[in-house]
Amino acid sequence: MERIPILKMGPYLLVTIQVDMHDRLAMTLQDDLTERISKTGSRGVLIDISALEMVDSFIGRMFANMAAIARVLDAEIVVVGMQPAVAITLVELGLSLPGIRTALDVERGMAMLGKSLAASTLPTPGDDGSGEGDAGPAE
Amino acid sequence: MSAHSDLGITKLVSARQQELLNGWIEAQLQSTNARPDLISRARLEEQSREFLQLFSRALDRNPSGDIRDSAWDDVRAFLEDLSRSRGTSGFSPSQTAAFVFSMKEPIFRAIRDTNGTAPEQQFEQVWKTTELIDRLGLFTTEVFQKGREQVIQRQQQEMLELSTPVVKLWDGVLALPMIGTLDSARTQVVMESLLQRIVETGAEVAIIDITGVPTVDTLVAQHLIKTVTAARLMGADCIISGIRPQIAQTIVHLGVELGDVVTKATLADAFYMALQRRNLTVTRVRR
């Protein structure tokens, strides 16, 4: 079964979507991402969708859900490289993804994550507190 | 029924063409719709003669007077040409249609002169001729109107293309000066070209200037919000500038929620803010 790879880059997770999303793939990605965030204790997730040409309301909602789930697990999601057509479609569908931060490309997204993590990760002694792994889809 | 019967004026028209022509030209020149400033007498005579010949020939081939028939192709083509050329040279629709309608008088006169003995037959002929000429006149008006509509459509298209430039103000700062009324089609074009330019240039800040937009209603406001949201989804910030006092009042009175869209009074203010976001500043050079 095809999967979208989730790469660990230092304190962040990097997800690049290079194929057209379909519903099953999006569900799998959500599961995998939740799993990986809780396992690695990453504080930031970068999703690169510059190759994504089509979205529907389901995929749009999946992004919103992933952001919400990540926030529950204390990680921040940045979506980068959205194509104009995708942006217009999401807006027309009424999905403005209010909780998600966006950037133009991966580089700027990284910078954005770095800045916000630097501001919030002052006290980090001790082990990684990856505890509550069962914070399932909040719906 | 009447469309398939003989009009009964075929012979009359072909036999008395010269007389009809003279009467018709006279009628056109005397009419209040005459425009000697726009068309010369010689040209008018030439057009009238040509039309009458075509008219006579069409009657000959299809005397029923059904102008959709192929026998009337030449007449229709001639009227289309005439209508178009008169439209561009400044005739009004009624003045253009008068070219055809003024033909009634000489034809009726001719009908009266030929068979003055049978009133019923005369009436029948007059009625059918009226119908025919009305159809031709309406056809002329229709073509005239169609020509105008094409002009309007073309201008709209040109306006659409003209009025949506996305300009680069600074490295990473785009501006979109909008001019004229915004409707759905235009906003769509504006939105697309702005987002496309954001991708191309990698600009982080886009300023939408609406100084040239005369009115903002709920729909326009909604379009603006959509554009700003779409740009945000792509990772660029939008600033709306140039909101005039009346428009600010309208927006509040309409209860439009601009949300967290940043608004500035002038393009200069918006530009200054954009520079600040990019950690740039403007200073006076000391000499």
Image (cartoon, rainbow, N blue to C red):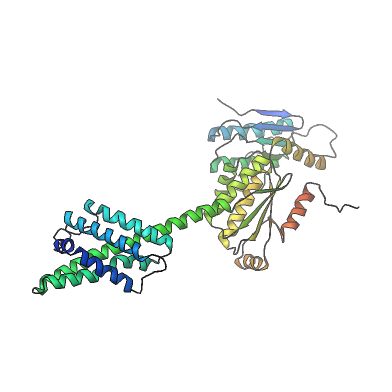
Measuring from the top left, give residue A58's x and y in whole percent. 54, 41
Left or right position of A28 against B130:
right
Residue B17 in view: yes
In which quarter of the view is residue B95 placed? Answer: bottom left
Residues B179 and B112: in front is B112
Measuring from the top left, give residue B227's x and y in whole percent. 61, 51
Q: Residue furthest top?
A: A1
Vertical comparison of B10 with A48: above or below: below
Residues B272 and B146: in front is B146
Residues B53 and A53: in front is B53
In which quarter of the view is residue B221 placed? Answer: bottom right
* Residue at 45% from the left image edge and 57% from the top image edge: B151
* Residue at 27% from the left image edge and 56% from the top image edge: B75
How many numbered discs, if any?
A: 0
Measuring from the top left, give residue B150's x and y in whole percent. 43, 55
Vertical comparison of B280 with B104: above or below: above
Left or right position of B267 against B101:
right
Q: Residue furthest left?
A: B117
